[in-house]
Amino acid sequence: MALLQISEPGMSPAPHEQRLAIGIDLGTTNSLVATVRSGVPAVLPDSLGRPLLPSVVRYHAGGKVEVGYAAQSRQAADPKNTIASVKRFMGRGVKDVAHLESAPYDFVDSPGMLQLRTAAGVRSPVEVSSEILRVLRERAELSLQGNISGAVITVPAYFDDAQRQATKDAARLAGLNVLRLLNEPTAAAIAYGLENAAEGTYAVYDLGGGTFDLSILKLSRGVFEVVATSGDSMLGGDDFDQRLFCWVVEQAKLPPLDARDMRLLQMKAREAKEYLTFHGEAPLTAKLSSGELVDLSIDSETFCGITQTLVGKTLGPVRKALRDAGLKVADIKGVVMVGGATRMPQVQRAVAEFFGRDPLNNLDPDKVVALGAAMQANVLAGNKPQGEDWLLLDVIPLSLGVETMGGLAEKIIARNTTIPAAKAQEFTTFKDGQTGMSFHVVQGERELVADCRSLARFELKGIPPMAAGAARVRVTYQVDADGLLHVSARESSSGVEASVVVKPSYGLADADIERMLRDSYEHAKEDMHVRALSEYRVDGQRLLEATRSALAQDGRLLEPPERQPIDAAILSLEKLLQGSDHRAIKQAVDALNRATEEFAQRRMDQGIRRALAGKKIGSL
Amino acid sequence: MRSHFDLFGLSPAFGLDGEALEKSYRETQSRVHPDRFAHAGDAERRASMQWTTRVNEAYRTLKNPVQRAKHILELHGVDVEFETNTQMPTDFLLQQLELREELEAAAAKKDAAGLDALRNRLRGEKDRLEGQIAEALDARQDFAGAAGQVRKLMFLDRLDAEIDEAYEAIE
């Protein structure tokens, strides 16, 4: 775990061969981008030296978009077009969002995910988030002076499939190659664990602007293993602001407020909350649009009183995660505090009391997630030599199931299952001659489908007519390393196979992303073909490089006649990469991928056999 | 590679060296995990995901006593028949009733200490049963007898899950 040490010459790729990889913490309140340079992880600041980017996006009528501090400063003046805390809306419908009435936006209900009406037109939370990611990508490109080869984007561990898919879509829309979606507490554990050479069982208590996660991890040399995770994706520092805002409205006996006053008071509430972290009392004054002056002050005791239930709400998931992990409080060696909201003294006290020990605060709670993401991105980009890297084993936070008779949810993959994971279940027809079956994919722990999140509905058609109960429909759930679900179904009893692959309905179709990309390039007056060509070239180069190095290592796994089509595919891709036909390059990439399928399988087989032989990683 | 045991180079036995399993699991994962192939081509990434999925499933199965026993029985062509065979010895059923009554009483009184005590008792029962299963599978190769014990263990697992729900309800 010698992460912070610069590697020996010859052990890792030379600096010019290092791929530029970044980690992005896409936060509710603030976002950050970090990278590992010469072995040292660092947050990349903007041109004024500011590390944070406020997650605020302002849309102008002319199509101009402002992101960050500039947008933040206009929140009260232009509340409807200035979107803050958009993360709360990712993958959510209008009915899913709490306190929607006190958000000053013009919401548009649409199937799957809500949308926001702005001066620049209707925007989805995915598009708003992509603006934030785009600014961070540009910041990194400028700072690192090169093309970013890939990014790790963090998400709350408790994000469900729809929220994860929305985040990945936003990253693609921002022109990022997503190496992995990484859970925020896991990212923090990487940064903390490596910095402190920690070994043992740790809890990460991550209270961000809008989300709460509690993850329990086993740290040992070279392995980060998440044992259980729990949380609340609708609880964060914003809710503390909201309580304080309600208290102000009540104390000052204010009439219903307009959007501008609401936003103003919410900002004042937030400032007062932050002030209370270091002071016993905070002033809270504001001049409303009516001319009325709000002049209050709040002491920390009152603030603790009105937010007590919120702090208490975080302890339920803590208990649940411990139970799921089969652990007691005494088994936890340390509690790592993450997220700006953990600065509140009442949160620190509650955690200290529950665990019977002082929480660990030696890393900046605002930066630790981005730093951990950068470290993981560096590993995924292949910049660390084997032996100096680590293995990360994460889990899905919520069970995945299917609707059965009577509106009940049957679990197919249980929460806290290590990913990637897959499970298949068989279903059959209940009517004679039935040729179709419909499925409803849900996520959550509750028994009734109505209480779970609906992820997707799909229909399998073309089942040959048979007697009831004779068809064998096998439904397979596959969760990938990003925690994203893919479902497929096939009927196989009759030898006739029908199969369908679904993507949860909250995710954007590839065509949508392409259209949005096109729109944004038109807007940016960038030539989409130039961009597409450069992306496919990068893709093609990456694949050539990976294939050549695989062949150099394990070429002997192939007989000469088996190798011939791979070599041919390499040659053809090499030739096309000289030209500028991006479609042809894409086809050649696909062809090379297909040609190497069997080879890839053999390499995995070999890996397993070597693992069995008990050989050390370094000795091969 | 037919059984989950083969995948980790372990001999198929109910009595399992947990440390050896974990070591082999991590060694295997470090070779096939998608993090190793984040920059590879589609073919390798797909193969990596398939293998990792399989390795995870094997590990999960072997770590869980009920699943491990079921797997061994399946390797010997014996079905545990949990869904169909509901015949259980009377004394076992009586004991189950008694444990469930205790659970209901503790849940009704919101008695966390009562739930703790019940859980400890259940742990003891499970240890005893797991010992018997190891004996039947590893020493005597009495698969029919083991299947009966595994069905009992499944009952106890369900009760364990209900205790979890009771904890959640009283919080």
Image (spheres, helix red, strand yellow):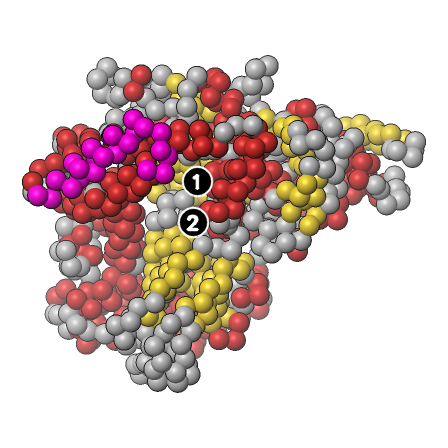
Residue A249 in sight from this viewpoint = yes
User: Which residue is more in the foreground, A286 or A362?
Assistant: A286
User: Which residue is more in the foreground, A518 or A89?
Assistant: A518
Residue A324 position in % (x across, y down): 43, 53
**Mark 1 falls within which chain?**
A
Is residue A563 within the magenta segment? yes
When the figure is inspected, residue B62 is found, relative to residue A67, above or below; the finding is below
* Start-end of magenta stretch: A561-584
Callout 1, which amino acid? Leu
Prevailing SS of the magenta stretch: helix
Callout 2, which amino acid? Leu
Residue at image x 38%, y 62%?
A: A500
Residue B24 in sight from this viewpoint = no
Mark number displayed over residue A181: 1
| Circles 1, 2 touching at the beta carbon (< 8 Å) | yes
Q: Determine which quarter of the picture holds residue A519.
A: top right
Residue B19 position in % (x across, y down): 23, 46
B95 relative position to A604: left or right: right
Residue A150 position in % (x across, y down): 40, 31
User: Which residue is more in the foreground, A512 or A212?
Assistant: A512
Quadrant where the image shows the N terminus of chain A: top left
Q: Secondary structure at mark 2?
A: loop
Residue A368 position in % (x across, y down): 48, 28
> Which residue is outermost to the right?
A291
**Mark 2 falls within which chain?**
A
When the figure is inspected, residue B65 is found, relative to residue A297, above or below; the finding is below
Q: Earlier in the sequence, mark 1 or mark 2?
A: 1
Question: How many neighbours does mark 2 have within 10 angstroms: few (below 14), some (14-19), or many (20 or more)?
Answer: many
Q: Which residue is mark 2?
A: A484
